[in-house]
């Protein structure tokens, strides 16, 4: 926690909102000196090495999804936040590009749902990647070119599609969760002591350099005993982790490309937010990414595969100014099912119906956000 930030908080106030605004501020810029940077290791008394279970994941399995052997992961816990685990980039050198491409090219595809579906027809949002290629590869003309669909992408939902209006998931709006992302998530959760994790819902957030994510708690999942995972790719972010009420001042930390966060146990339902995107420091994006070489897969069971050079050209250009965050959630406990929803009988809904889904609404935390009907607004959380 920045001393500056703490000193501006008086008791009884909404401490989280004050600190959110502090880190979001442009003029003058905030003091970042107390933002925890886990990539530097155990740097303060607040940080400790977290114990993992290296026996839970075989090295070959880990390599198949682009992860280092669990014994090589640098995992940390944070004093005062039981159940919170921060894994500082456990990805093998050169494997992040695969996941970045999944986020930009594969996961936005139908039947997954994205912000553009809220005001465009399914055929218009059918091939976001393909329709964006021309615009993205063209040299800047100096004119105000229309933004490509990829540049207008703000969120994608996977599995049980989150309804931003009702803040619920439902049995009748589900499409298969991507098998590769499920595999990645279940290995990480297993290593953290949660075997049998089921990746059932995913939210991808696409941030530009001026985006932020409002203060919120992820409580829509029906089983809070299951962990929530968060992956970060591209530019870095300031992440604020607070308490169970808004008066608890949050702890600020960097999330760099490849970093993974697990919120479980007592930390599963804590307030959190992303007030600011910051440029990735040297060695956090470019090095890692540029070392990517489209080598062939060493074994057949790998999920992480080679990619055409043209794909990487587009991805690397995108992440030079953007950040992608993926959160993966288990919605239902073992044997649990959704309660009946009498207002929406299943027969009245079709698979491609998206009329109840809208751009992410502001959450009333008092933080002002730019919004527009085109969906090109800040990333905001319900
Ligand atoms: C979320 C979330 C955090 C991030 O999508 O619920 O909290 O780092 N994302 O973008
Ligand atoms: Mn969240």
Image (cartoon, rainbow, N blue to C red):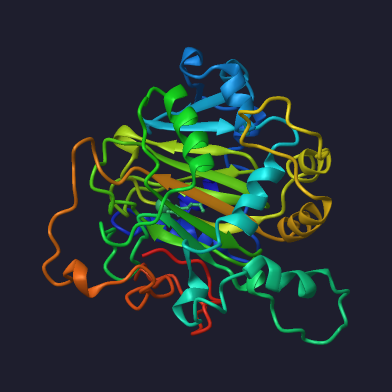
Q: In this view, does 32 lie above or below 174?
A: above
**Is residue 292 left or right of 122 when viewed as pictured?**
right
Residue 306 in view, yes or no: yes
The furthest residue to the top: 55
Q: Residue at x 39, y 56 (%)?
A: 175
Horizontal and vertical percent position of residue 97: 71, 45
Q: Residue at x 49, y 38 (%)?
A: 261
Residue 369 in view, yes or no: no
Q: In this view, does 280 lie above or below 353?
A: above
**Is residue 68 left or right of 313 when viewed as pictured?**
left
Q: Residue at x 64, y 58 (%)?
A: 105
Numbered disc total: 0
Residues 247 and 335: in front is: 335
Horizontal and vertical percent position of residue 90: 62, 30
**Is residue 332 left or right of 47 when viewed as pictured?**
left
Residues 216 and 65: in front is: 65
Q: In which quarter of the image is residue 63?
A: top right
**Is residue 51 left or right of 364 when viewed as pictured?**
right
Q: Give the quadrant of the C terminus.
A: bottom left
Horizontal and vertical percent position of residue 375: 52, 77
Horizontal and vertical percent position of residue 146: 71, 84
Q: Which residue is drawn at 23% across and 47% down?
A: 222
């Amino acid at each position: 926690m920045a001393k500056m930030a703490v000193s501006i908080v008086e008791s009884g106030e909404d401490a989280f909102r004050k600190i959110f605004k502090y880190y979001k501020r442009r003029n003058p810029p905030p003091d970042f000196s107390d933002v925890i940077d886990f990539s530097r290791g155990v740097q303060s008394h607040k940080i400790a090495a977290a114990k993992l279970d290296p026996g839970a994941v075989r090295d070959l399995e880990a390599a198949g999804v682009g992860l280092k052997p669990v014994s090589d992961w640098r995992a940390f816990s944070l004093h005062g936040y039981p159940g919170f685990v921060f894994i500082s980039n456990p990805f093998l050198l050169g494997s992040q590009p695969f996941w970045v491409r999944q986020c930009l090219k594969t996961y936005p595809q139908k039947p997954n749902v994205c912000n553009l579906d809220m005001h465009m027809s399914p055929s218009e949002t059918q091939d976001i990647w393909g329709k964006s290629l021309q615009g993205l590869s063209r040299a800047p003309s100096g004119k105000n070119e229309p933004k490509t669909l990829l540049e207008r992408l703000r969120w994608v939902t996977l599995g049980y599609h989150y309804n931003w209006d009702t803040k619920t998931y439902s049995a009748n709006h589900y499409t298969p969760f991507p098998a590769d992302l499920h595999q990645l998530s279940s290995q990480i959760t297993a290593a953290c002591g949660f075997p049998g994790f089921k990746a059932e819902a995913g939210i991808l957030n696409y941030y530009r350099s001026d985006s932020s994510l409002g203060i919120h708690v992820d409580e829509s999942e029906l089983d809070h005993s299951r962990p929530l995972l968060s992956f970060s790719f591209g530019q870095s972010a300031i992440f604020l982790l607070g308490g169970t009420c808004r008066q608890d001042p949050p702890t600020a930390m960097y999330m760099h490309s490849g970093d993974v966060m697990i919120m479980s146990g007592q930390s599963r339902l804590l307030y959190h937010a992303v007030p600011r995107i910051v440029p990735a420091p040297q060695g956090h994006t470019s090095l890692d990414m540029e070392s990517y070489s489209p080598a062939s897969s060493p074994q057949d069971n790998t999920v992480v595969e080679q990619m055409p050079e043209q794909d990487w050209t587009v991805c690397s250009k995108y992440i030079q100014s953007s950040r992608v965050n993926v959160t993966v959630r288990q919605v239902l406990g073992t044997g649990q099912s959704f309660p009946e929803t009498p207002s929406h009988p299943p027969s009245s809904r079709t698979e491609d119906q998206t009329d109840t889904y809208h751009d992410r609404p502001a959450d009333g935390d008092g933080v002002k956000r730019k919004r527009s009907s085109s969906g090109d607004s800040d990333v905001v959380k319900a």
